[in-house]
Each structure stands twice: as structure tokens, then as C-alpha cells.
Image (cartoon, helix red, strand yellow):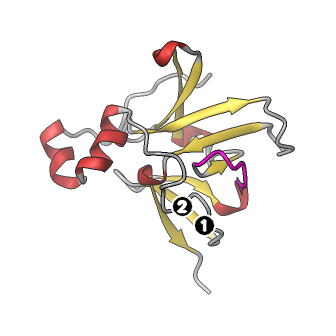
Amino acid sequence: MTQHTQPTVVKSDAEWRAQLTPQEFHVLREAGTERAFTGEYTDTKTVGVYHCRACDTELFRSDTKFESHCGWPSFYAPSDAQNVVLIEDSTLGMKRVEVRCAACNSHLGHVFHGEGYGTPTDDRYCINSISLTLEPEKA
């Protein structure tokens, strides 16, 4: 499990609220979850790079995105492991591993291992669309 590092982007709640919509703030800063099958990137096949919506750090690339049919975008690996922090999460009465942006400590989603999707890592980074922005590859 990745050790928690000090974020490089630090803002007050008031600053985050001024930058983010109420829904973005709830997910990114309060570790909320968007409803399944409602996010803009759930079924996106666009080739490009996914960034943190809060601080623009590169998080995932479209070539690691796969169809998990879980209701949220799924990736089998971050583009750079140093850009995410993994934290044990035992809320909701279950053991999970939370994924946060290493740069700004925003909540992104959770990672699950060993589900048998046949990906190179056997990991499923289940990420809220609202935590991401997609930069399409230039043609």
C-alpha cells in the first residue's frame, strides 16, 4: 500500500468550494460517490489522458481503461503510481482501499484486486467520473 505523502496542492475548504461545483466538492473533498452509471466517463472510449478535476495532475490513460460494467470508469493501473495514494478504508462496514490524488489529496474512488477481469494487473481502479477530466489525444 502506498504511503500517504504530503499534498503539494493545499487549499482551504472555502477555496475548494469556490473552485468546484457542490457535487465535485462532495466527491473530491468529502469522499462522496456519484451514483452508478451516471458519470460522463463511464462508457467513454475517447483516447486520451485523465486528470484530477481538482488539480489537473495526470492520473490515468485511456489505454488502461476497461469495461467492468460496475457503473464507474475502471482502469487497471494509474499512469504513474506516484500520482495516487492508496489508503485502507473501513467505512461502510467493509475493507476497501481508497484512491486519492497524491498532489491534492482529493478522493477519486477505490481500487479492488483479484476480481478476475483478465487485465495485466488484476486491479480495478473504480473511479468517479466527477473526479476526472479527460484530455483527448490530439489527432
In the image, residue 61 sits, relative to residue 87, either above or below, namely below
Say few, some or many: other residues with alpha carbon within 10 Å of mark 1 (under 14 / 14 to 19 / 20 or more): some
Give, as a single range, the part of the protein colored magenta. Answer: 65-71
Residue 132 is situated, as x and y percent measured from the top left of the image, at 46, 55
Query: Dividing the image into 4 quarters, which one contains the N terminus?
Result: top right
Q: Residue at x 50, y 69 (%)?
A: 135
Q: Quadrant of residue 95?
A: top right
Q: Give the structural element (helix, strand or loop) at label 1.
A: loop
Say few, some or many: other residues with alpha carbon within 10 Å of mark 2 (under 14 / 14 to 19 / 20 or more): many
Q: Quadrant of residue 126?
A: top right
- Whether residue 65 is visible here, answered yes or no, is yes
- Whether residue 79 is visible here, answered yes or no, is no
Residue 55 sits inside the magenta stretch: no
Q: Amino acid at mark 1?
A: Thr
Residue ID for mark 1: 44
- Do the numbered discs 2 and 1 sit on residues whose CB atoms are within 8 Å? yes
Q: Residue at x 60, y 52 (%)?
A: 73
Residue 138 is situated, as x and y percent measured from the top left of the image, at 58, 82
Residue ID for mark 2: 41
Q: Amino acid at mark 2?
A: Tyr
Query: Dividing the image into 4 quarters, which one contains the C terminus?
Result: bottom right
Residue 69 sits inside the magenta stretch: yes
Say whether residue 128 is left or right of residue 116.
left
Circle count: 2
